[in-house]
Amino acid sequence: MHNVAKSNYTKTYRQKMITIEKKENKPLLGREEIYAISQDKVTPSMASVKEELAGLLKKDKELIIVKKVESKFGVQEAEIKAYVYDSQEALKNFEPKKKEKKTAAEKKE
């Protein structure tokens, strides 16, 4: 065992724990649907879930779309639903496009 000197200054590190509960392969859509649970004191952000899943699944984070991160009151768990696409083309075909703001020139016409 290592002797660790105790001090008044302590650092706390947040450890993220995501457990993949279920994977559904959808070959016609070119994606895998991931259902997972995060056991953390705080509901994780979609960006942190995306990075964590990319590390767990060893996939490019650009191909991961997090659909839902939902927690219930009084429970230190969050339900996660995410899509992991096989290719960029499949992602473009099936994911809705983000709404773009109209420019002033388009509004005049």
Image (spheres, rainbow, N blue to C red):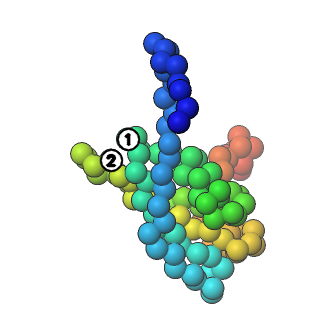
Q: Nearer the viewer, residue 5 or 60?
A: 5
Q: CA distance from mark 2 to mark 1?
A: 5 Å
How many neighbours does mark 1 have within 10 angstroms: few (below 14), some (14-19), or many (20 or more)? few
**Image disc number at residue 91:** none
- Above or below — where is 16 with respect to 33? above
Q: Quick one: label 2 or label 1, which is nearer the N terminus? A: 1
Q: Position of residue 89 (x, y in %)?
A: 75, 73
In the displayed orientation, state which residue is furthest to the top: 8
Name the mark on residue 41.
1
Does residue 21 appear in this view? yes
Camera sees residue 98? no
Verify CB contact (< 8 Å) between mark 2 and mark 1: yes
When asked about the image quadrant of residue 21, the answer is bottom left
Q: Residue at x 63, y 85 (%)?
A: 27
Viewer-nearest residue: 21 or 98: 21
Task: For mark 2, give the secondary structure.
Answer: loop
Q: Position of residue 4 (x, y in %)?
A: 53, 25
Q: Residue at x 49, y 29 (%)?
A: 12
Point 48% across, 18% down: residue = 6
Q: Position of residue 90 (x, y in %)?
A: 70, 74
Residue type at numbered disc 1: Lys
Q: Residue at x 58, y 83 (%)?
A: 26
Residue picked out by circle 2:
76
Instruction: Please state the horizontal and vertical placement of residue 70, each as a whole percent of the image.
Output: 38, 54
Between residue 107 and residue 96, name the one nearer to us.
96
